[in-house]
Image: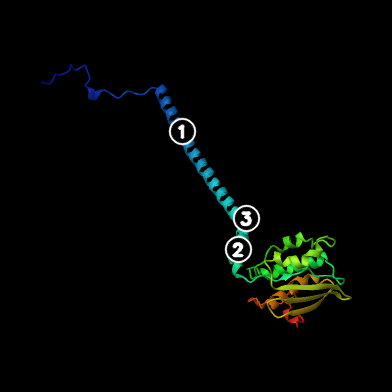
Amino acid sequence: METSLPPDIPRPSQIPPPIPSRKSKAYLWVLAVVGLVVVVFAYSAYIVMQQKMTAQEDALRAAQAKAETEARPHREILAKINDFRHHSTALPACPLVYPLLDAKGRISPLGTYLSYLAMQQASFLPQSVFCMVDAGQSFSEFGLFDADSPFHQAYYKQLPYYFQNAKDLGEGKLLKSKKGWKIQLRFWGTKSEKKYTRVFRQGKLHLAVGWMASCLQDYMGFRPTAVPTARDADAFPTRRANSS
């Protein structure tokens, strides 16, 4: 049975909602502003972190690319060294070219360097074509880069042992002429003896290394597969060499 209320007492449905005070409104506004600030700060921190991570990734990629660029030449050199090590036993031995002597039959640093560089150039094109020992070290042990070394007397008979008992040998002379320099070469050993002669005019002696290397290859019967360019014609004038 429903109990009726006195007429002067309002029913619950007739009671109006409470009106928030000014202090309550201010508090709600403060909470809203604080929440917005927190959201903005969190979003800004997220953006900053993303940018920082992106910058770190870019820096890491740049460092890796730089390291790759710097390491590439070293890897190529190591690959050539490994190629030489793996295939050197199957390659023919490079002939030992004694230091070029002067007109009096004496050692000269220039003649030693020409012989050494000619063996180097003939052996590496840049692929290995001849098996070659450390000629520079062997020459140094006999003081062949020094015009007045006391070890010169023993080099002629001892050097072949340093070159793995080289069976093919070369020798020659470096003679000063009116036109420049005259080089005479002779190769002998397991193949028919061959001689070469050429005069290099003043300022052209730098071509002697290439010419001597081509003479060595000609004696060994090696023919490079690459077609020489016009620029290389003077450096490798095999056809111009007077051979017998």
Q: Give the CA distance from mark 3 to mark 2.
A: 24 Å
Residue at 60% across, 63% down = 85
Left or right: 148 as drawn, with respect to 220? right
Of marks 3 and 2, the one in the foreground: 2
User: Cβ–Cβ below 8 Å for labels 3 and 1?
Assistant: no
Residue at 75% across, 70% down = 209
In the picture of the structure, the residue carrying the numbered disc 3 is: 70
In the picture of the structure, the residue carrying the numbered disc 2 is: 85
Residue 232 makes an appearance in the image: no
Q: Is residue 234 above or below residue 163?
A: below
Disc 3 marks which amino acid?
A: Glu
Disc 1 marks which amino acid?
A: Val
In the picture of the structure, the residue carrying the numbered disc 1 is: 38
* x and y, in percent, of residue 162 in the image: 70, 64
Of marks 3 and 1, the one in the foreground: 3
Which mark sits nearer the N-terminus, 3 or 1?
1
Colour pattern: rainbow
Disc 2 marks which amino acid?
A: Arg
Residue at 72% across, 73% down = 169
Q: In which quarter of the image is the N terminus?
A: top left
* x and y, in percent, of residue 176 in the image: 87, 73
Instruction: Work out whether residue 70 or residue 244 is closer to the camera in this orientation and state it.
Output: 244
Q: Residue 95: which quarter of the image?
A: bottom right
Crowdedness of circle 1 by 10 Å Cα count: few (<14), some, many (20+)?
Answer: few
Residue 37 makes an appearance in the image: yes
Q: Is residue 164 above or below residue 43?
A: below
The residue positioned farthest toward the bottom in the image shown: 244
The residue positioned farthest toward the left in the image shown: 1
Say which element carries label 1.
Answer: helix
Q: Give the CA distance from mark 3 to mark 1.
A: 48 Å
Q: Give the CA distance from mark 1 to mark 2.
A: 67 Å
Say which element carries label 3.
Answer: helix
